[in-house]
Image (tube, rainbow, N blue to C red):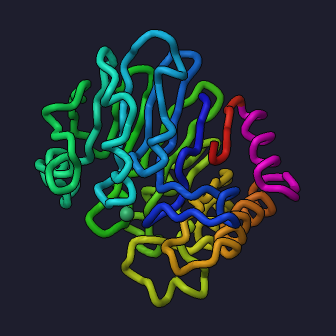
Amino acid sequence: MRIKFRGVRGSVPWSVPEGIVHGCNTPCIEIYDETTGGIVVLDAGSGIVGVNPSQIVKEPRPVSLLLTHYHWDHLLGLPFFSTLYQPGWDMTIYAPTLKSHDPKWLDTIFKSPFFPVPYDHLPNKPNVGMVSPGKLDLPGFEIESLDLNHPGGCLAYRIEGSSGDLVYATDHEFGNPAFDEPLADFVKGAAAMIVDSHFTPEELPQHRGWGHSDWRECAQFAAANGIVIVPKGTLDNIGRGAGFMGQAAKGPVEKAHQTAVDIKISKADTALRAFFRRLGLYLTLWG
Ligand SMILES: [Zn+2]
C-alpha cells in the first residue's frame, strides 16, 4: 500500500516559504495498492490537484474518492480533480451519510457563481455512492468506517493493507467517551494513524466544541493504543506562524515514538519513511 500525503493542513491552503516543507494544501491522501491495483483518494482538499491516476497506472480502472465530511477544506479541490476531465475512467465519489449531508452539495459546488463548468457538463461525470459507519468494499480495498466527534459529523476510515492497516481520523475532538472508546477499539492492531492534532494544549481550552484536538492528546491516544501517528499537520489559519506549524507537526510524532515505538527520531520525515518501509508501506510525506 503506497500512501502519498497530498494535503495535510486544515482550514485553508496557506503557502509561505517556512511552511513549504510541512505542506500547504488542505487534506487529501492518495493510496495505491500495488497488490490489488486499487486506487482510493481520501478527501478532496486542495491537495487533490496533485492526484492523477493516469500517472499511477497506464490503463483506466476504477478510482474511488472517499470523503470524511463536508467541511470546505476537505472539498475545495474537487472541481480541479484530473479524473473528472479524463473520459474512460470509472470514478465514484463516496459521500458520508451524516446529519450535515445535503443531497445538493455536489451540484452546488459546480454551480454558478462558484465554478464555471456545471456538474452536468463534466467530461467524466462520477458516480455517487453513500457511505455509513461499518464495512465498505471498494475496488481493491476493504475499508471500515466509524463516526468521529466533529460538528456536523465526520467519518474515520480504516484501510486494510497486506502489511498493515492505516487509520485516517482527520477531524476529531477527544474527550467524549461515547466516541473515544469506539475509536480506541477501531484502531486496535492498526499499523499507523493519521490524526487531527489541530491545536496546541494551550489553545485547546478556548476552542472546545470546535471538533479538534491538541497534538498532545493525539500522541497520548496513539501511545495508549500502540500505534504510530502521523499528525494531520493542520494548524488552522492564516494568522499562524509557519514555524509553529512545524513544531506542532513534529511534536506528536516524537512523543508517540518515545512512548509507543522504539525509534529515536531526529528528523521526522526520514524516520517516518524508514518506519513505514519496514511495515511494507510506502510513504511519501507531503509529496
Ligand atoms: Zn471538519
Magenta residues (range): 261-279
Q: Is residue 56 left or right of residue 192?
A: left
Residue 87 falls in image quadrant: top left
Question: In the image, is residue 46 above or below residue 203?
Answer: above
Residue 191 in percent (x, y) is at 64, 42
Q: Is residue 262 magenta?
A: yes
Question: In the image, is residue 214 above or below residue 80?
Answer: below
Q: Is residue 263 left or right of residue 276?
A: right
Residue 246 falls in image quadrant: bottom right
Question: In the image, is residue 117 above or below residue 104?
Answer: above
Residue 123 in percent (x, y) is at 24, 25
Residue 180: in sight, yes or no?
no
The residue lying at 56 percent from left, 74 percent from top is 214
Residue 110 vs residue 104, the one in the foreground: 110
Residue 146 in percent (x, y) is at 37, 50
Residue 29 in percent (x, y) is at 51, 42
Residue 102 vs residue 165, the one in the foreground: 102
